[in-house]
Image (cartoon, rainbow, N blue to C red):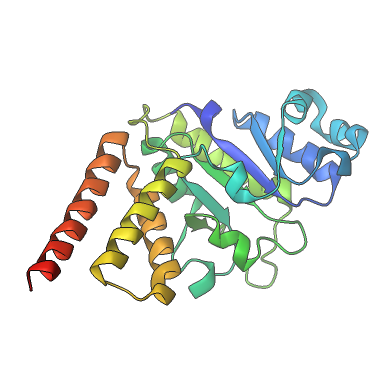
Amino acid sequence: MDLSQTCIVLCRPEESRNIGAVCRAMANSGLSRLRIVGCREEYDDQKVRVLAIHSASIWEAAQFYDSITQATRDCSFVAGTTRRPGKKRKDKLLLPEELAHLATRVPGGAVVFGNERTGLTDAELAECTMGVTIPSHKDFGSLNLSHAVQIIGYALYRAASLHSPGSIPVSMERLDAAVQIIADDLQKIGFFSVTGRDDMERFWRGILARAALSEGECKYMEKIFNKAAGLAQRHRQEE
């Protein structure tokens, strides 16, 4: 597994020093692609470098975005970190080892970490295709941001040293286009009302991201739904 293709995404981090510590944790695990939802100008360059030490190059190459969706458009899956499961926060949460096992089959994914105080909001987690959690004691479940990155990074690094790369999956941008086609076709068939479309799109986005579709598989799935919609339309015309 090539960890150089795996992205660490920090969403709205507050502390410049924490970003520096994250850079060091990433370097320990062979990770180098840092993306931040926020503006570079909001952070103190010197404070970042003090804790980054010899990993400052990760900070220098960091890319900045307005949203998680923009930051992960070219990624194959998007795993949002959270302590709390729930209907709006992903019903099933992967353990770090399970995420690492997935990453051995699906290179080029992203792991998203929320704000130090509040974590990822429900809306931000909804932008991710799956959730991942780090088990901790019930009386003190909150982890330091860089520690969380270190634990996930270590799991990825260990898995990378044991497995060879899998096939190359489509990007989230390509997957989202396929989900739109599937939802359009299901709506033509009358499978759901307009008000149920958002839930259906979230369902397909999550399950297809975990399936790690190749471009050929993606096109074939689109073709299946297009054909089903066409047959349903023809059947109605014949009635």
Residue 52 visible:
yes
Q: Foreground: 129 or 22? A: 129
Q: Foreground: 107 or 172? A: 172
Q: Which quadrant holds the N terminus?
A: top left
Task: Please provide percent x and percent y for residue 236.
Answer: 14, 70
Task: Please provide percent x and percent y for residue 33.
Answer: 63, 31
| Residue 205 occupies quadrant | bottom left
| Residue 207 occupies quadrant | bottom left
User: Which residue is painted at 85% across and 48% down in the image?
Assistant: 15
| Residue 124 occupies quadrant | bottom right
User: Which residue is painted at 67% across and 29% down in the image?
Assistant: 27
Q: Is residue 129 left or right of residue 69?
A: left
Count of marks placed on residues: 0
Q: Is residue 49 left or right of residue 228?
A: right
Task: Please provide percent x and percent y for residue 188.
Answer: 28, 65
Q: Foreground: 91 or 96? A: 91
Q: Foreground: 138 or 31? A: 31
Q: Which quadrant holds the C terminus?
A: bottom left
User: Which residue is painted at 27% across and 40% down in the image?
Assistant: 219
154 relative to 14, above or below: above
User: Which residue is painted at 34% across and 31% down in the image?
Assistant: 166
Residue 86 visible:
no
Task: Please provide percent x and percent y for residue 18.
Answer: 80, 45
